Image (cartoon, rainbow, N blue to C red):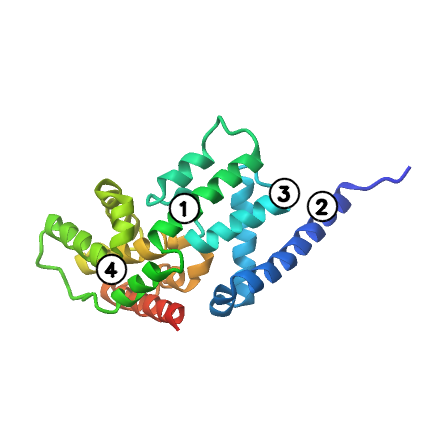
C-alpha cells in the first residue's frame, strides 16, 4: 500500500494552492485588467493569498467559491467582509441559517452586483464621477473647528464626492463610517481634523479596512512607518500616495 507521510501531504497542499494562485492570476489578468495593470503581479499574488485565507473563514474552500470571493475583494475592497459600509455583506457571511457554501457565495455575489449597479453604475459612471470629484475637494486644515462641526463637514464632502453611495448607505451608516475612521486613524497617531477627514475619505472610497488591504499596501506602509512620527507629514504622504493611486484608476 502506498503511504504518504504528513510532510508529503503538506507539500501536496502547497502545490495545489500554487496552481490555484497561478490560475487565479490569469483570471484577474483577463477579467480585471486594470487591477492587474495598476497593482502588478507581485501585489496581485498577495491579494490572492489574502483572499484564500479570508474566504476559508467563511467555509469557502472550493476553487469556484474562492474565485468569486476574490472577485468581490477586487470590487469592494479586500476587507469587505467587515466593512462598516457594507452591513449586508457581513449579514450574509454570518447568517447561520445558510449552511451551504455555494448558496452563501451566490447570494453574496448577487447582492454585491445589485449594490454596485446602484452605487457605481452599470458602466461605473458614478464611480468614475466620484474619482473626478475627489480632485475638487479641498483638504485644508480644520484645526480650528469643533469636532462636531468637522463631522458635519466630512459628511457634506462625502455627499459631494459620491452622492449615490451616501444615499445608499444612509445617514446612520455614514456616521458609523466616520466613527470607525476616527478610531482607526488614532491607531496610527492621526487625531487632527485634517488627517481624520482624509482618512475617512479614503475609507469611504477604498473600504473601511483599506489600512490592511494588500491592494493598498503603499498606504499601509505610510501609516505604519515609524520613521515619520510627525502627524502632518504622515497625513501629507498618505494623501499624496492615495491621489497617485486614484489617478491611475482614472487613466
Residue 165 placed where, x, y %? 29, 51
Residue 82 placed where, x, y %? 40, 42
Residue 223 placed where, x, y %? 35, 60
For marks 1 and 3, give the one nearer the viewer.
1
Secondary structure under the numbered disc 1 in the rendered image = helix
Cα distance between the residues tagged 3 and 4: 38 Å
Cα distance between the residues tagged 4 and 1: 21 Å
Q: Quadrant of residue 21?
A: bottom right
Relative to residue 58, is residue 244 drawn left or right? left
Q: Quadrant of residue 28?
A: bottom right
Mark closer to the chain start, 1 or 3: 3
Mark closer to the chain start, 2 or 4: 2
Mark closer to the chain start, 2 or 1: 2
Cα distance between the residues tagged 2 and 3: 18 Å
Mark closer to the chain start, 4 or 1: 1
Look at 38% across and 55% down and name the residue there.
211
Determine if residue 117 is in view: yes
Mark closer to the chain start, 3 or 4: 3
Relative to residue 49, is residue 196 drawn left or right? left
Secondary structure under the numbered disc 3 in the rendered image = loop
For marks 2 and 3, give the one nearer the viewer.
3
Return the mark for residue 10: 2
Per the image, the residue denoted by label 4 is 161
Return the mark for residue 62: 3
Look at 70% across and 50% down and name the residue there.
16
For marks 3 and 4, give the one nearer the viewer.
4
Contact (CB < 8 A) between labels 2 and 4? no
Per the image, the residue denoted by label 1 is 114
Amino acid at each position: 500500500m502506498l503511504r504518504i507521510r504528513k510532510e508529503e501531504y503538506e507539500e501536496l497542499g502547497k502545490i495545489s494552492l500554487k496552481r490555484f494562485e497561478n490560475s487565479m492570476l490569469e483570471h484577474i489578468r483577463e477579467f480585471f485588467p486594470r487591477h492587474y495593470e495598476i497593482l502588478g503581479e507581485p501585489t496581485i499574488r498577495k491579494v490572492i493569498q489574502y483572499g484564500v485565507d479570508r474566504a476559508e473563514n467563511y467555509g469557502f474552500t472550493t476553487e469556484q467559491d474562492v474565485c468569486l470571493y476574490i472577485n468581490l475583494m477586487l470590487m469592494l475592497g479586500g476587507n469587505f467582509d467587515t466593512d462598516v459600509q457594507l452591513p449586508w455583506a457581513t449579514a450574509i457571511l454570518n447568517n447561520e441559517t445558510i449552511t451551504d457554501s455555494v448558496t452563501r457565495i451566490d447570494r453574496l455575489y448577487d447582492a454585491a452586483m445589485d449594490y454596485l449597479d446602484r452605487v457605481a453604475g452599470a458602466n461605473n459612471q458614478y464611480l468614475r464621477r466620484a474619482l473626478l470629484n475627489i480632485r475638487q475637494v479641498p483638504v485644508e486644515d480644520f484645526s480650528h473647528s469643533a469636532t462636531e462641526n468637522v463631522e458635519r463637514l466630512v459628511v457634506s464632502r462625502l455627499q459631494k464626492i459620491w452622492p449615490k453611495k451616501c444615499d445608499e448607505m444612509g445617514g446612520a451608516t455614514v456616521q458609523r463610517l466616520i466613527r470607525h475612521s476616527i478610531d482607526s486613524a488614532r491607531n496610527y497617531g492621526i487625531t487632527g481634523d485634517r488627517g481624520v477627514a482624509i482618512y475617512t475619505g479614503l475609507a469611504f472610497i477604498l473600504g473601511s479596512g483599506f489600512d490592511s488591504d494588500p491592494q493598498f499596501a503603499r498606504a499601509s506602509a505610510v501609516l505604519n512607518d515609524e520613521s515619520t512620527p510627525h502627524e502632518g507629514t504622515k497625513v501629507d504622504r498618505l494623501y499624496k500616495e492615495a491621489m497617485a493611486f486614484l489617478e491611475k484608476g482614472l487613466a
